[in-house]
Image (spheres, rainbow, N blue to C red):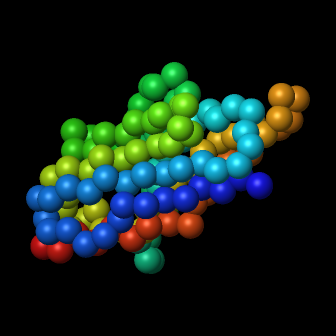
Amino acid sequence: QVQLVESGGGLVQAGGSLRLSCAVSGSTFSIYAMGWDRQVPGKQRELVASVSSTGGTNYIDSVNGRFTISRDNAKKECYLQMNSLKHDDTAVYYCYATIQLARYGGVTTYWGQGTQVTVSS
């Protein structure tokens, strides 16, 4: 059974940094895109950053230049380094991974349980 486990959230002052980690556990054949979404109560969930299996990255404009997404394919882990944090970055951050479980199986997106990031102004 595949699970995504996030860690690294917490409380930080504006201007500070946090590093989120996401580990994929369980047997997998191939992991394609990985990324991070965030959710603020009452607002639409938004994709913050994504990284392809070959390392190509995408960011929403509001975090470009401040956040860096990366992955370690051997460890099946994804990271989000968040610098110069702002109050508006406060949200629950969810890791996702698009995974093929078996050689001839389909591809499914899996989500972590979420980790709270709170930025005090």
Residue located farthest toward the bottom when viewing the structure as drawn: 42
Q: Nearer the viewer, residue 31 or 67?
A: 31
Q: Quadrant of the C terminus?
A: bottom left
Residue toward you, 7 or 97: 7
Residue at figure coordinates x 66%, y 56% from the top left: 3
Q: Could you tell me residue 27's position as x and y percent?
A: 74, 43
Which residue: 44% across, 77% down?
42
Expressed as whole percent of the image width and height from the top left, the position of residue 56 reads: 45, 25
Identify the residue at horizontal 44%, vertical 67% (top origin).
115
Q: Residue at x 40, y 45 (%)?
A: 79
Between 19 and 27, which is closer to the camera in this rendering?
27
Q: Is residue 73 above or below residue 114?
A: above
Q: Is residue 9 left or right of residue 112?
A: left
Q: Is residue 23 visible?
A: yes
Using the rendered view, name the quadrant where residue 98 is placed: top right
Query: Picture quarter containing residue 67?
Result: top left
